[in-house]
Amino acid sequence: MASVALQSAAMTLSTPPPLSIDALSSHTSTTQTSSADLAHYKDLFSKLRFSYTEQVTKERFLKALTADPPELVSDTADELALLERKLVDDKAALKAKKVAVATLLTELDTRSRELARDKAALNGDAEILLALPDEIHSLTAQIEELKSAQPQSSGNPLLNHSLSSTIDLRDAKRNESAALQAQIAATRAALAQHGVEAQRLRTELDAAEEMKRAAVAEVLDLRKRRGDGRWDEEEKRARWVRAQAGVLEALVG
């Protein structure tokens, strides 16, 4: 009888075709879409629950009136109070869970944005470091070009310098070579350090994405459980019992 009432109540609602898990996951990409979907299904399930409760209550009431002897409500006031307290506790637990999930999603979104900014900055530094060898090669080629373009009085341009100029040139070349070697070593060390940092950021980003997917899956599971009616079953029973008690009191009075 309950299943027939549920089908009758469901036929009174014009519901869209159910979405798959993949489709629901795609809807969580933006907070606005998720909120709209949640509000739509909350309203839909509220209407379905009300229609179902109304239909079942009517059928049970008619059955109780036509039975011989008439059926009476067997639940006591203590049982009703226990059910109401349990319903309040379940609702509070569900609300706390929703708040925790929303907080976790906010933290994950903030952390993901920070990691994305760090990764972009790291990529920019890496591009600068990778461009240094090409710049060094270009400068070396320009030096050679200038040397070849300079008119020489002999076959060896170094022979045109005085001894002091040659010594100064040698020392300058050595210093330049040492500075260049130090710059190359620093560049290699920076590249290695940035590579380690990039790997660490990738690991953190993957962990954050995994936590986000787990949180989304948990939210979808909560929606599915609420859609199955397991959270509202106690509330339906309490409403039905109160309705039966009110009807019987009216009949007795």
Image (tube, rainbow, N blue to C red):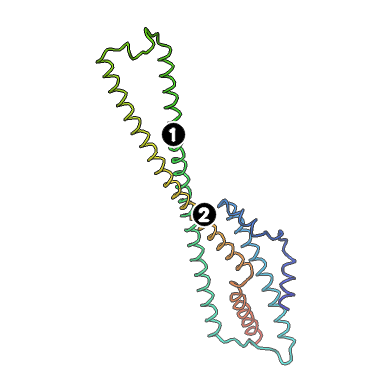
Q: Give the residue type that dot 1 points to.
A: Ile
Q: Is residue 207 above or below residue 95?
A: above
Disc 2 marks a residue whose amino acid type is Glu
Q: Position of residue 11 (x, y in %)?
A: 75, 66
Nearest to the eye among marks 1 and 2: give it: 1
Q: Residues within 10 Å of mark 1 (few under 14, many from 20)?
A: few
* Residue at position x 68%, y 77% in the image: 57
154 horizontally vs 223: left or right: left
Q: Residue farthest to the front?
A: 155
Look at the image and tell me in which quarter the N terminus lies. Answer: bottom right
The answer to which quarter of the image holds residue 40 is bottom right
In the rendered view, would you say 100 is above or below 65? above
| Separation (CA) of disc 1 from disc 2 | 29 Å
Given residues 11 and 19, the one toward you in this image is 19
Please state if 27 lies on the left or on the right of 89 as rendered: right
Give the residue displayed 45% in from the left and 35% down from the top. 130
Q: Which residue is identified by label 1?
A: 128
Quarter of the image with the C terminus is: bottom right
Q: Secondary structure at mark 1?
A: helix
* Left-right relation of 98 to 63: left
The residue at which mark 2 appears reads as 209
Q: Single out the residue that lies furthest toward the bottom.
A: 69
Q: Nearer the viewer, residue 212 or 145?
A: 145
Q: Is disc 2 surrounded by few (<14), some (14 to 19) or many (20+) residues within 10 Å?
A: some
Q: Of residues 76 and 163, which is closer to you in this image? A: 163
In the figure, residue 146 lies in which quadrant? top left
Q: Residue at x 71, y 85 (%)?
A: 64
Residue 165 position in % (x across, y down) = 27, 15
